[in-house]
Image: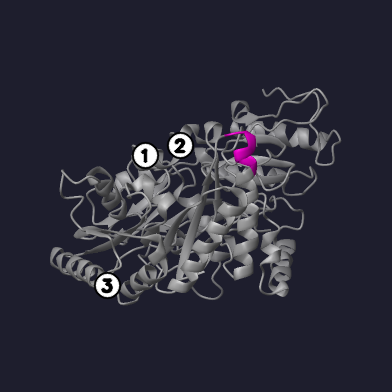
């Protein structure tokens, strides 16, 4: 039996008997020990039970946290709220590691939170065909470990090994091979009325159909990416062929050469010399990877057969040396135990090969603390714009970061992820000690980044919970935004699912 507080504050500040009744029903679905009710301040205001977040964004007030352990429990929970009588809306997160953008926090106050980390089953896997059906609580470390020694690998990110595969893909996170949204083949979704549907490609026991996400008619998988149209309870994720051999060429160049050096790297990508995502770190970001002070660092991955890797490595290093733009060129750090950056180089190559390093050594080196303590102790903001992959555009982005430094005193780290020959995902990071002037300056710097980069046409592809209004401000066609809201009206007329960061 669950013990409810004397009153539960409704979405408009009043006691809401309907909400109390539904939370009691939720406790019967998942168990009383898996429902957390917020406490109250002396003035009666509800207190969030989600804990702090690493970005020091304002903690949203929530009406409770429910922790289901199965897709059927999620379906039953959504059905409890489906008539809209409570006025509370459901906000779901996978494992809560959305650091820098809001962590576990909803975009708005007044939600009931569904913590899906308990949905942690790898339901099915076919290495030969290259797919796995995973739930939101499955971490990249767990799936990658299962694939160790097989012919397939996971497209991993450089975030913590203990982050969600599904959650990151649904927010268009970037792996070391490509954007993770490209790995979503199918989704299992609980719609706002409590119905469960499967969209895209899904394994069929009676017939082994080819893995193809688009199917016949309108493709529905992307409808639920960065979406508030349902709760995803599982995904079919593509598993990539594991290369027979792999090497990462490591380069350095001076900041004054950013335009020419990035233009040269773009040529290599366009001509097929690199595999996966080429990563370019500015001076601030390069430090965690052993980059020399005052220098940019580049990781260029080549893979394939042993012979092709040897040949491509030779071509890339020869092109780099011939250009005269790079102060250092190395392709042997991971093989030479005496190399200064041997340990880092080994971990980088393993990540490109699908091993996210369960020890989180690189992640902790970058963040200064383990993932489990990041929200309680860290100070960290993300800004994620897309920039054309041209030397001139990347030099301009670098100049904007310098302008922000001059205006706010905040030195931003930047990692340029080449998503192909035409576009770069620019991951801008701001670290700060918790509390005090540094945190305020970091948030001021974030505001300026949105303004300056948007004016330049470098728009973000992911938003944080304090800049959700930019989804409207940056829309190229207001009619498209209106159409998206018409879809929301049709699918979720009672507003059962909370508005997300892109609503």
* 171 relative position to 325: left or right: right
Query: Which image quarter: residue 25?
Result: top right
Q: How many marks?
A: 3
Q: Distance between the residues labelled 3 and 2?
A: 40 Å
Q: Which one is earlier in the sequence, the residue at label 3 or at label 2? A: 3
Q: Which of 430 and 196 is in front in this view?
A: 430
For label 3, the residue is 323
Q: Is mark 1 on a helix, strand or loop?
A: loop
Q: What residue is at 43 percent from the left and 47 percent from the top? A: 159
For label 2, the residue is 371
Query: Which image quarter: residue 81?
Result: top right
Q: Quadrant of the image for the C terminus?
A: bottom right
* 62 relative position to 358: left or right: right
Q: Which one is earlier in the sequence, the residue at label 3 or at label 1? A: 3
Residue 314, horizontal then vertical, whole percent: 17, 68
Q: How far apart are marks 3 and 1 (CA)?
A: 36 Å
Looking at the image, is mark 3 or mark 1 nearer the viewer? 3
Q: How far apart are marks 2 and 1 (CA)?
A: 8 Å
* 371 relative position to 58: left or right: left
User: Is 269 drawn above or below residue 128 in the view shown?
Assistant: below
Callout 3 crowding tier (Cα within 10 Å): few <14, some 14–19, many ≥20: few
Q: Give the range drawn in magenta.
A: 434-440
Mark 2–mark 1 CB contact (< 8 Å): yes
Q: Which one is earlier in the sequence, the residue at label 2 or at label 1? A: 1
Q: Nearer the viewer, residue 394 or 365?
A: 394
For label 1, the residue is 360
């Amino acid at each position: 039996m669950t013990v409810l507080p004397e009153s539960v504050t409704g979405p408009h500040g009043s006691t809401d008997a309907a909400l109390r009744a539904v939370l009691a029903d939720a406790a019967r679905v998942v168990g009383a020990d898996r429902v957390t009710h917020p406490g109250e301040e002396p003035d009666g205001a509800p207190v969030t039970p989600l804990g702090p977040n690493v970005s020091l964004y304002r903690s949203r007030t929530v009406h409770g946290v429910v922790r289901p352990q199965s897709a059927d429990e999620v379906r039953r929970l959504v059905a409890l709220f489906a008539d809209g009588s409570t006025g509370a809306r459901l906000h779901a997160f996978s494992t809560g590691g959305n650091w820098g953008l809001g962590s576990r926090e909803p975009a708005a106050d007044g939600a009931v939170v569904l913590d899906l980390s308990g949905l942690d089953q790898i339901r099915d896997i076919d290495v030969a065909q290259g797919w796995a059906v995973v739930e939101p609580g499955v971490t990249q470390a767990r799936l990658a470990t299962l694939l160790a020694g097989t012919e397939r690998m996971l497209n991993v990110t450089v975030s913590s090994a203990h982050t969600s595969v599904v959650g990151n893909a649904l927010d268009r996170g970037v792996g070391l091979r490509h954007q993770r949204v490209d790995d979503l083949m199918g989704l299992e979704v609980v719609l706002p009325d409590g119905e469960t549907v499967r969209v895209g490609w899904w394994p069929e026991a009676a017939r082994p159909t080819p893995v193809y996400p688009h199917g016949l008619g309108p493709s529905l998988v992307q409808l639920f990416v960065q979406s508030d149209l349902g709760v995803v309870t599982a995904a079919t994720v593509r598993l990539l062929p594991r290369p027979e051999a792999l090497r990462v060429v490591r380069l350095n160049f001076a900041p004054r050469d950013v335009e020419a050096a990035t233009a040269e790297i773009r040529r290599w990508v366009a001509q097929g010399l690199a595999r996966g995502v080429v990563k370019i770190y500015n001076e601030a970001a390069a430090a965690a990877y052993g980059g020399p002070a005052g220098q940019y660092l580049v990781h260029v991955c080549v893979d394939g057969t042993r012979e092709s890797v040897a040949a491509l490595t030779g071509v890339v290093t020869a092109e780099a040396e011939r250009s005269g733009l790079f102060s250092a060129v190395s392709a042997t750090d991971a093989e030479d135990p005496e190399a200064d950056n041997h340990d880092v180089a080994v971990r980088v190559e393993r990540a490109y090969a699908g091993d996210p390093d369960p020890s989180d050594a690189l992640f902790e080196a970058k963040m200064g603390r383990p993932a489990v303590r990041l929200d309680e102790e860290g100070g960290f903001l993300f800004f994620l714009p897309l920039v054309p992959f041209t030397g001139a555009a990347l030099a301009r982005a670098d100049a904007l970061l310098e302008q922000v430094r001059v205006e706010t005193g905040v030195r931003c780290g930047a990692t340029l992820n080449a998503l192909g020959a035409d576009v770069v995902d620019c991951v801008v990071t701001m670290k700060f000690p918790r509390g005090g002037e540094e945190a305020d300056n970091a948030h001021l710097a974030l505001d300026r980044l949105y303004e300056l980069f948007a004016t330049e046409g470098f728009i973000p592809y992911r938003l944080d919970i304090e800049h959700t209004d930019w989804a409207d401000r940056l829309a190229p066609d207001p009619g498209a935004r209106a159409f998206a809201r018409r879809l929301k009206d049709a699918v979720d007329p009672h507003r059962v699912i909370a508005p997300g960061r892109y609503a």
